[in-house]
Amino acid sequence: CPDCGLLQDRVPTLEQDWVLLEPDMNPLAHTVPAEHRWIELSDGRVAVYEVCPPDQFQQCRVPHRLACPAQPLPDLWPWLTSLRGENARRVERQSDPEPPPPPEEWPDAG
């Protein structure tokens, strides 16, 4: 990978193209979003496996870009991206300095 320096598997697709997949990783298909599941065919090519719900025992391959430590994760689930943003704001709020203590004597507000 030009970004992280790790090896990738360059595998032909059904569309006469190539995809770079994470080597030695075959997660269960139901744990991977449909558009990122690549199924190995008997002739060595791969195809995107968008069957929903997938067979619970079907294994798949994932693109290296999902596992690449040098690239940001894509927006796989919008709600998760929103949650990440909110968690980042919570961290900022937690690291903000404490508000100053109230004065010992309050001014006369009349």
Image (spheres, rainbow, N blue to C red):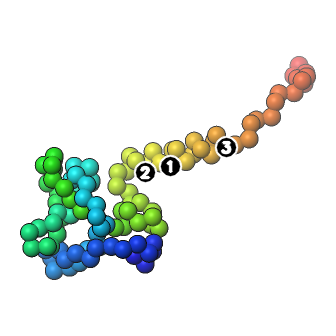
Up/down of 17 relative to 87, above or below: below
Q: Which residue is mark 3?
A: 95
> If the image is split into quadrants, where does the N terminus sit?
bottom left
Secondary structure state at the residue bearing disc 1: helix
- Kind of residue at badge 3: Ser
Q: Which residue is mark 1?
A: 85
In this view, 31 is above or below 105:
below
Closer to the camera in the image, 100 or 8: 8
In the displayed structure image, the side of residue 78 where residue 18 appears, left or right: left
| Residue at which label 2 appears | 81
Name the residue: 19% across, 77% down. Answer: 12
Query: Where does residue 2 sit, x and y in percent of width and height?
Result: 43, 78
Does residue 35 appear in this view?
Answer: no
Residue 110 occupies which quadrant of the picture?
A: top right
Where residue 34 appears, x then y in whole percent? Answer: 22, 56
| Cα distance between the residues tagged 2 and 1 | 6 Å
Residue 15 lies left or right of residue 81; in this view the side is left
